[in-house]
Image (spheres, coloured by chain):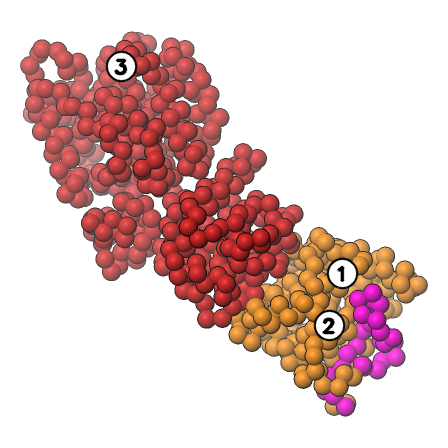
Chain colours: A orange, B red
Amino acid sequence: MPKPQIQLDPTGFPMIWVEEIEAYIHWLPVTKIQFEYFLCSAPDSRFDAAWYDKLLQVNERVSPSEIRTGNYWGAFLTGIKPSEAERFARWCGQGYELPSQEQWFSSYNSTKRLAPIALEALDSAGPIRERCSRLLKQLDAVSRGEVPKVLGEQRTRADQMFFRMGVMEWVDTKGQRSRWGGMGQTNPTFHGSLFVPDHGRADLPIDPEKDDRLPHYGFRLICRSE
Amino acid sequence: MPRIICPFCLKSHDFSRSLACTEHPEDSVPIAYVNEYNQAPPLWLALVGFSGVGKTCYLDALALTLEKISPIWRGMFYRLLDQYTIDTVRLMHVQAASVRPAKATTGPADVKPPRPLLIQVNKIPEAGSRCLVIYDTAGEVFGSLAETEQYMTAVLNRVSTTWFLVSLQDLKKDASGKTLMDLFNTYLTSTERLGIDLTDRNLIVVYAKADHETFTPEIKRYLQSDPYNGLTVPDTNFGDLMPFNFKDYMNEMGQISDLLEAYTHAQVDQGAAFISIVKNKGINLKFSLCSALGQDIRSESGQAQSHFRRYRVLDPFLWAISLERAYVATPIGMILDSAPESQFIYDDKFLSTLKDRLSDYGDITCYYLGQARAVSAPGLKLPPFPRFARSRLVGPVLDHEMSDQWRPFIIITAGKIHDLNDFGGSRWRDQIFVVNLIEELEQDWPHQMQYQSGDDVAIIANLLMDLKLRGTDHA
């Protein structure tokens, strides 16, 4: 099996090349640790302490060492609105953006045909910071147990990347009823949902920007530049 | 202009606008000290010894020797940088010119902060130029530090080389039974209480009044054979003096240090214990000897002190020069809350007093919780209360710290820090101290304390430095 091509995003978290979309995609949905780098490097009154406190009320933060099967979704950033996720993408730099619905689905389909990889493969782009490394290991251990238990299936690379059993992820629906939709599947303990990503259709919240924050919605980015 | 350490308050300042010390405004730092800081960097020295041991005599002998040595050290010259140093050295010379011995000028009563002598010595052969910043302190001072604790913290923390002046004869005759070990224990206890780590510091034991001692013949020969003992005698013919070779002279000093250590181990009361404890503390120990006057001044010869020959006066000075490493201040991070509940610490004196206190231990860089970039560099003013409240996050600050050097952070917060637990199992566990401003706020963190308005800020600094000592012990 060819080695996966990896790059690190500006927060030092890994992204993996997906040939079908000709871009890198985040290994995981964007975590709170990653978003905190953004909050701390570009202080913006729009993302002040009260803003982040609200998000943490919606989905409580959990430290890497405290990740368990009953709380791991606390590592991911959720409750975020699409425009806020776009702000994060702009901060990451040229080429970073939220995936379209097709790009997300292609990445999911591509990776669900592949076996999980050894986490050491993610180091190939450069040393990974201690916190990130610990987080990757803990989440990997959780997905190893949860996927067979909850889904009754063997874990694939897509599961290792939490395309399933993670969060609902904002995608650009390119002009459907609402510009922004959601793809993914949550752990039922975190958020009950009958949505499955295999259908290829996006969940379409009515007005993501104006409505209350959705506690189970996060995002991951793609990157076209190397 | 580089960050310059003020010789009076021992903190980094920007002297580009004013030469006044910010903490002792009555004291102006000499312009030569500032302008030539890079060319003649400070060499911080403390001269410690019991009253009457001859510290002032030694300094006088050293000053006289440095005044006269330029024919031997070609190109060398020296300057006394401020009026205090000029007056003090002149007073020493006046005393040297009289027959009667100079009285001890430092004693137990001298507990107020000692003002340093500032002596710039330029173009020392193979050693370059240095500005000697010499603190002359009676040993008894270390036992009564209540009034001068903060100042002595700054001095002891900054000084990398201490001259321990000891007269073995005086100790033998001392009615109270003082020993070399007593002097060191007093010094050590004080530094421990002040949270100062002595690892890698230099301690040079100088056996003063060496003409009185019954050293081994080899040591005695070394003392007597000082080729420069006549330097300060009027009308000396410098052409008769042998040229100075730094390397050869230092080699010989090294051999004598070993012999004196063996002598101390075998012959000096509690000498072996002294050597063991010093080395156990990671202190770099050397031995030296000198005779500042060359003879017993109680003798009835009637000879003026200006005609005395001075033996091996240069040795402690040369040890200090050769052992000196560039002082590297401990970088300390102060991370401040920006939430409205914490505004009071910016308004009252808490932050400035704490920063001032911590500056005795290292260079302070300030951050806000929730902002990775520093908001204030060492020597600069405290940052103001920020315009908007950032999230209580510390990870991006810590994750930027790449160095393995022990670097403590003190975090002052009025609320729970969201990501502090991420570091509980990391190297940061014993490098972060949290100060909680709100009652009953408990972080899940091993090192923290509750602060209330009016509490003694010094406790915070001491607790932080305790972490360093614990970390050093476990290294």
On screen, residue B90 above or below A211: above
Q: Amino acid at mark 2?
A: Pro
Mark 3: secondary structure: helix
Q: Is residue A6 visible?
A: no
Q: Amino acid at mark 1?
A: Tyr
Tell me what residue is drawn at x 34 percent, y 28 percent.
B143
Instruction: Mark 3 vs mark 2: give the one in front.
Output: 2
The residue tagged 1 is: A72
Callout 2 crowding tier (Cα within 10 Å): few <14, some 14–19, many ≥20: many
Which numbered disc covers residue B170? 3
Q: Does the segment drawn in magenta span residue B300? A: no
Q: Is residue B456 visible?
A: yes
The residue tagged 2 is: A215
Q: Amino acid at mark 3?
A: Asp
On screen, residue B368 above or below B263: below
How far apart marks 1 and 2 lie (CA) works out to: 14 Å
Q: Position of residue B226 (x, y in %)?
A: 23, 20
How far apart marks 3 and 2 lie (CA) works out to: 80 Å
Q: Nearer the viewer, residue A26 or A51?
A: A51
Which chain does tag 1 point to?
A: A
Magenta residues (range): A177-203
How far apart marks 1 and 3 lie (CA) works out to: 72 Å
Labels in figure, total: 3
Callout 1 crowding tier (Cα within 10 Å): few <14, some 14–19, many ≥20: many
Tell me what residue is drawn at x 48 percent, y 61 percent.
B342
Q: Quadrant of the C terminus of chain B?
A: top right
Mark 2: secondary structure: loop
